[in-house]
Amino acid sequence: MESFFIKRPPISFINKFPFTKEAKDYVRIMEITPDNLLRDKYLINECLSFIKKLASDGHSSVINFEFHNIDNWKCYALINYFLYCIGEPILWSRFAEIMRQNIEKELGDKDLGNIIRIAKNTFQWEIEKIKPLIIRKLSFDWRLKWYNYINVASTIMDESWKLVNNYIDNGWVFLSTPKIRRLIAQKVRNDVFNKSKEIPKSIPADVASMISEIKSIVKEVKDKYEKSNIFITSERRKEAYPPCINHLLNKIKSGMNLAHYERLILVFFLLNIGFTVDEVLKIFKLQPDFNEEKTKYYIKHAAGNIGGRTRYKPYNCIKIQSFEGICKKNDDPKKWCTSLDPKKQIKNPIVYYSRMVWLISKFIQCPKCGYRLSKDKISNAKNIICPNCNEDLTDLIQK
Amino acid sequence: MFRHIKLESIDDLKGYLKNHIFRHVYVSGAYYQYPDGQTMTQKNWLGMDYLIDIDCDHFETSCKSKHDSWQCLNCGKNGKGRPPKSCSCGSSRFSEFNWICDICLEQSKKEVLKFIDIFLPSFDIPRDEITVHFSGNRGYHIIIQSEKIRHFNQMERREFVDYLTGAGLNLKFHGRIERKKYIPPDPKERFGWGEYIYNGLIKLINDCDNGSLDEVNISTRMKNIIINKKQTILDELKSVYHSVRSISTETWSKLVEYVKKDIAMKLDSPVSIDLHRLIRFPNSLHGKTGFIVKEIDIDKLEEFDPFSDAIAFLENAHIKVEMMGCPEFRIKDQIYGPYDKNQKIEFPLPAAIFVLAKEVGKFI
């Protein structure tokens, strides 16, 4: 049986599974380089149209995208090449998801030879086909070493994939054929997405205009997303900060040294409202013990740019209150921090901030009587008067 | 603190330790291409051993209420045992006083034995890739030096730690749910946690005469039924397609839940997940006890006595110490204390080093 797998795979295998070792070997043996592929105008156009659609409409729009009269492996190679040039993680992530879905579809239930070939040759998994083990009407036809299993299963967020909920014996995890198919597809997805971490390639002159068009589409998509997400907006409003954050910023401004946990609270908050690493760094420049390299390292860590790649969420109010003297709920002009009403209560400084930003964007407040006037109701009249105290608000609105 | 140090030979290490007097000595659990790089990027991470840190601080023991104590940093209120979540004054900031005794360290050792006896057979990790160290203070370290595991990322490490602690375990994958109640796994499902739970149940019921059911939240009537029908229940449980009629499904659920909690390892998860963790240097002295961070032969783990086998100093020298108050402690066969504040005691060297390192006494 093993000799069957040693045979050179047919081109149909390479077209179906262009990510495999066999496909890479084929490309190497045939001495195909990006330059060869970039001579084919039709191929270039097809691949760029695919990426353009991927950028504008998302992965679901291209799941059934068909390349006419071209080898699939060529498209895969060139799409990868272009994605390297564009260097946008969002495109890699969408392409990875398409690959996952396609591979799962292509690996049929009876396609056992291909499962073994891919698992062993491409991923170097320790995998064995076993005599079916029937448990609760489910057939477990495979066993895979636990370290190969968790490499992929740990990226699938479902309890049935957790190692603790699977059958394991002497290092082997027992799996059904659908689960093995999913694991292979997920592994391809992860590998494709990991390519987004690589440094972008330089863009060939011939396709520069098309690539720049794709980049502008991606930018539009991102802008649209950012506008819909209040935390990521670049227009950060200092007047919306909760009292605890204002307290910490005032401490910095006055040159006082912040404790370790005070720094964490501030860094996590600022990063989560859209500050960049360099912007946060600037804020800490006033710290008496400021060390640019060290501080930058810690901020990058908190931002998930290095280390465990976890982007830390801001501390919630309970946690902040556990540190003495930081929570300034009594200084809150809105009285949200001290409210007993569950609808008004603040559980996290970010909630305070987003609620304030929303208020500021929707209303203006009369400085004299505090009356809130909806911006939607302000007419184009030249003079705006507070309906409560008749104060002239024209200057305030223009400002 | 001296960090980012690369030493190329044992002689270099000896020389370095002789020239600098350190209270604590650590070694990186991670492998780097350039260990002396000043930042993590410069070091170029190559891998990390899998560390399991078992510390008696992570589980409840009956002795804690006797020798541990706390004080509220806000109002000064104090008490025995572990600090509450928050003080009656509202503050949740406490200073803690922790002590070690035979009970705590025996409990820590049981966790190591659990790993070796229960979990290890499910994995194909050779014994010679595993080392166990007494930490020198409150517990033990298990270090897995395996090529297969060394390159695990944090998610993979978390998955393994979740397996050991039973985090995310759903019993429906390891047994039968009938009328929303749990029945232990069939023989075919006895792999991994299904097997641990099954074996744990057999042991629990087997030992029921000796009070093993005392901590399980079931009625006295049920306990009596289990004790009286022990053999029938065990026979039913061991049958191929068991249908245990002697115990209600609700009682089964409670028994299983108890067994699950008992089997789950109590360890310091962040240590296992970390990719850059430092570990105490084997055979160095723990700066808070003066005990040796000692490697233990796994086969002799049960006999290991930390208060005797990890003592570094000879007893022929004596030192006079003024005590600040501390619970009793044992060094080899000798029990010392408890001591009150201002008591002046002449201790043999190992006991003197212990109280000085624990900072419950000072030289006079």
Image: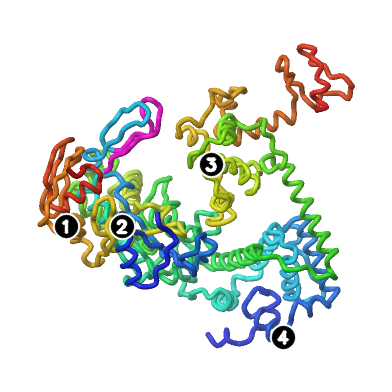
> Horizontally, is A353 left or right of B235 in the view?
right
Disc 2: host chain = B
Compared to residue A147, the image places residue A251 above or below, namely above
What numbered label is drawn on residue B21? 2
- Type of amino acid at the residue the image marks with label 3: Pro
- Mark 4 or mark 3, which is nearer to you? 3
Instruction: Tell me residue A342's x, y (percent).
Output: 56, 26
Tell me the colour scheme of the image: rainbow
Q: Does any portion of residue B237 appear in the rendered image?
A: no
Residue under label 3: A288
Disc 1: host chain = B
Disc 3: host chain = A
Disc 1 to disc 2, how far (Cα)? 25 Å
Residue under label 1: B308
Disc 4 to disc 2, how far (Cα)? 64 Å
- Mark 3 or mark 1, which is nearer to you? 3
Residue under label 4: A30
Disc 2 to disc 3, how far (Cα)? 31 Å
Q: Residue at x 76, y 51 (%)?
A: A221
Instruction: Tell me residue B226's x, y (percent).
Output: 23, 47
Whether residues under marks 1 and 2 lie with C-beta atoms below 8 angstroms apart, the answer is no
> Horizontally, is B17 left or right of A128 in the view?
left
Q: Which residue is drawn at 32% across and 72% down?
A: B11
Secondary structure type for disc 4 = loop
Disc 4: host chain = A
Instruction: Tell me residue B251's x, y (percent).
Output: 32, 44
Secondary structure type for disc 2 = loop
Residue situated in front as seen by the camera: B149 or A23 = B149
